[in-house]
Amino acid sequence: MKKSIVIVDDHILIAKALEGIIGNFNEFEVIYVCENGKDLIQKIEEGNTIPDIILLDISMPIMDGFETAVWLTKNHPAIKIMALSMQGDDNSVIKMIKSGAKGYLLKNTHPRDLETALTRLNSDGFFYPDWASKIIFSNLNKETESEIAVRISDREKEFLKYTVTELSYKEIADRMCCSPRTVESYRDQLCEKLDLKTRVGLAVFAIKNGFAN
């Protein structure tokens, strides 16, 4: 029995072309096509067949691929989501994976590679080509600024507040009732945590994350 696929893409010509290509695959079949995430949700809630795999575009009007992937992951976690997009930048790949996608392909993928990707997604539960895997691995150990902010101590937060002022480190030490050397240790620890090198960088981080108030 063939595995069912739904294509979600607002470019109808591309979606129909994909449908034709997949129609030549032995193990897969397209059961319907949707123009965006809202259209997909409506079809599912109307009782249309829930597919095994969804080929999901990212840039779509009304409801984009990120929102759609989050909804699918929450409501139909058994569906395997394969992102299929023109966007191959780090942010799009990582955000899509965090939204629930189990695979990622570019729209210029060769039909033979698409069939391989679908087969691997179906059998292994995920598929990322080498270029996408490199992006994933390079971002594995990167924390978001909000995640890093959680690990900043109260005294470091107090120091951050002063980085946006014109106070010298000695004057900051006086305000914080500690030695200049202690202030320098706060600076060094924060630069290491945030991968920054200058007070300007610390000041920008403080402003962006609400520590300068």
Image: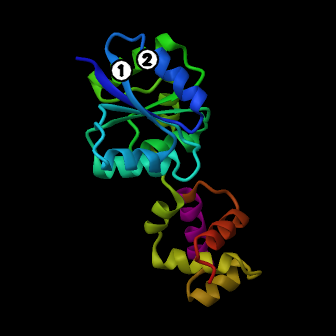
113 with respect to 208 (left or right): left
Residue 36 position within the rendered picture, expressed as x and y whole percent measured from the top left: 50, 44
The residue carrying mark 1 is 29
- Between 20 and 192, which is closer to the camera in this rendering? 20
Mark on residue 180? none
Disc on the earlier residue, 1 or 2: 2
Residue 130 position within the rendered picture, expressed as x and y whole percent measured from the top left: 49, 22
Disc 1 element: strand
23 with respect to 46 (left or right): right
130 with respect to 54 (left or right): right
Mark 1–mark 2 CB contact (< 8 Å):
yes
Q: Residue furthest left?
A: 1
| Quarter of the C terminus within the rendering | bottom right
The residue carrying mark 2 is 22
| Residue occupying the point 56% across, 89% down | 177
171 with respect to 190 (left or right): right
Residue 63 position within the rendered picture, expressed as x and y whole percent measured from the top left: 51, 52
| Residue occupying the point 46% across, 51% down | 38
Figure quadrant of residue 170? bottom right
Figure quadrant of residue 115? top left
The amino acid sitting under disc 2 is: Ile
- Between 213 and 166, which is closer to the camera in this rendering? 213
The amino acid sitting under disc 1 is: Glu
| Quarter of the N terminus within the rendering | top left
Q: Is residue 109 above or below residue 99?
A: above
Q: Residue furthest front?
A: 46
- Estimate the spatial distance between the alpha carbons at disc 1 and disc 2, rounded to whole Å: 6 Å
Residue 110 position within the rendered picture, expressed as x and y whole percent measured from the top left: 54, 14
Report the span colored magenta.
180-193
Q: Is residue 60 visible?
A: yes
Q: Is residue 131 visible?
A: no
- Between 14 and 56, which is closer to the camera in this rendering? 14
